[in-house]
Image (cartoon, rainbow, N blue to C red):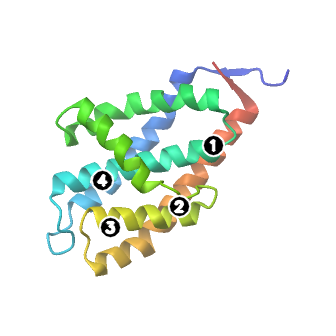
Amino acid sequence: MFWKTRVVPATQFAKDYSAGVVERAELLLKHIADLSSDQASSPVAHRRKEVCAMVWATIVAAFEVSDFDKADQDKLVPLVLQIVLPHWQTHFVSESEMRDFLSKRIFAYLGDKHPNNPLEAASAMIQELSTAIGASSHMAQGFGLILTPLIAQHILSDTKLFNRIKRDCRIA
């Protein structure tokens, strides 16, 4: 399309987008890590890993329902992961452990949930996170009330951002 004159390098898109992702993850990491053992029974280190996996699942969900085609996704998703890896690496023994963990846990967070319904997907993700970190029933209920709308909003806003970029720009 001739009006798509703005070219956005894929690496620049990934870098700009990842800045918000890292900030989002840090807020959740702090909130989840600060829980007492009465509120979440799993060790803090495991909670941090699970938060990274859930945030990664929200990113993948947004890409999947966006207007980005498979070629765009195949180019952009690994670039985003490459940029967030150094920020999340401190929660893992190695980069390979982190990649393995994220790729295994994404199926638990997304599984057969369809991200076309962000609220449903977010609710399932928060339930999975609550189970994975051993959240008390009170905390799990609180997560459902507070974090579900937040995660759904992230999926929606990321999808809208991706669609606007796809519509107005050409990723190179």
| Residue 130: mark | 3
Q: CA distance from mark 3 to mark 1?
A: 28 Å
| Residue 45: mark | none
From the viewer's perspective, tell me whether residue 83 is left or right of residue 135. Answer: right
Position of residue 171 relative to residue 132, above or below, is above
Q: Amino acid at mark 3?
A: Ser
Looking at the image, is mark 3 or mark 4 earlier in the sequence? 4
SS class, disc 4: helix
Looking at the image, is mark 1 or mark 4 earlier in the sequence? 4
Please provide percent x and percent y for residue 40: 21, 69
- Residue beneath disc 4: 50
Question: Local crowd at mark 2 within 10 Å, few (<14), some, or many (≥20)?
Answer: many
Q: Amino acid at mark 2?
A: Ala
Q: Farthest right residue?
A: 2
- Residue beneath disc 2: 121
Q: Residue at x 17, y 56 (%)?
A: 44
Judging depth in this view, the residue of 68 and 33 nearest the camera is: 68
Q: Residue at x 30, y 75 (%)?
A: 139
Whether residue 24 is visible, yes or no, is no
Looking at the image, is mark 3 or mark 1 earlier in the sequence? 3
Q: CA distance from mark 2 to mark 3?
A: 14 Å
Please provide percent x and percent y for residue 10: 56, 23
Judging depth in this view, the residue of 15 and 61 nearest the camera is: 61
Q: Amino acid at mark 4?
A: Glu
SS class, disc 3: helix
Q: CA distance from mark 2 to mark 4?
A: 16 Å
Please provide percent x and percent y for residue 104: 35, 45
Looking at the image, is mark 2 or mark 4 earlier in the sequence? 4
Front tag of 1 and 4: 4
Whether residue 128 is visible, yes or no, is yes
SS class, disc 2: helix
